[in-house]
Amino acid sequence: MIRRIHLFALFAASLLIGSAATLSAQETEPQAPDNDAILKDIMNGQSSNYYPSLFMRYMAGDTTLTLDEYRHLYYGYAWQPEYEPFDKPEVKDKLLLLVAQTKDSLTLENAEQIVDYANEVMRFDPFSPGNLNFLIYGYGAIGNKVQEQINYHRLQMIAKTIMSSGTGLKETSPWHVLTFAHATDMMAYLGQDYGTRRVVSRTTEYVPLLVRQPGGVKGYYFNFERMYWRRPEKMPQKKPTGWEFNGIPIKKRITPVH
């Protein structure tokens, strides 16, 4: 029998991973990606981090890839020709619509279609936490435990990779992501409801939480600079009256909520 899983309960299994991933990421000091070193490494055919080899292992479902290798994979993707952070292929909308329409009455046929759509998304957004979650959901529903576990592991490692790039708690120590969607995927992964996202600098946005977390955490900062490396003319520009992003005025800094 196909399991019936609520759309926003799809991250339920991931929440268990999320707690472990947070602890693991904090075992070592979070550090922003060294872009120059990563680029040099992934272009070196003699390096163990040579990108074509790493990516082939990732797509083959290799679960022995280390956190350092995942950092090269995830952040190295910004230099790959397939990286198009502003594109939104039609299949993404088809996938979201199908999951929403079948969340309360999932059939085997629906589950197989979800897997097909999500695997197509993998061709141009291979590190999307949200899409990996759909693969976990789809493969789990059709009973393919091997692929379910492979994507479960991928999701855990991508989350750990992002959390290893900073504390996420300060503008000076943000979590580095490849797309805006990856930031909101991380909020879902952590099981956090959030308010209106705000751009606070040319490279950083702030995602406030609706409920303050233990330790006084009010929100998380994300660095999105890689999205604009190929489109510098699209970077948010400073204006005399303040900052604006996508036509929306923003404040340069955020006044803390007490």
Image (cartoon, helix red, strand yellow):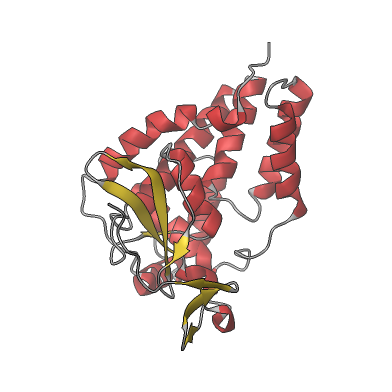
Rendered location of residue 191, percent (x, y)? 43, 36
Asked whether, in this view, residue 11 is left or right of residue 105, the answer is left
- Furthest-bottom residue in this view: 240
**Residue at x-position 45% and y-position 39%:** 189
Rendered location of residue 66, percent (x, y)? 36, 46
Asked whether, in this view, residue 123 is left or right of residue 11, the answer is right
Rendered location of residue 147, percent (x, y)? 57, 30
Q: Nearer the viewer, residue 37 or 231?
A: 231
Q: Nearer the viewer, residue 204 or 256?
A: 256
**Residue 134 drawn above or below residue 199:** above
Residue 50 in sight from this viewpoint: no
**Residue at x-position 38% and y-position 71%:** 35
Number of numbered discs? 0
Residue 14 sits in quarter: top left
Rendered location of residue 93, percent (x, y)? 73, 47
Where's the N terminus, which quadrant?
top right
Q: Nearer the viewer, residue 29 or 184?
A: 184
Residue 85 in sight from this viewpoint: yes
**Residue at x-position 66% and y-position 52%:** 123
Asked whether, in this view, residue 107 is left or right of residue 44, the answer is right
**Residue at x-position 63% and y-position 19%:** 143
- Furthest-top residue in this view: 1
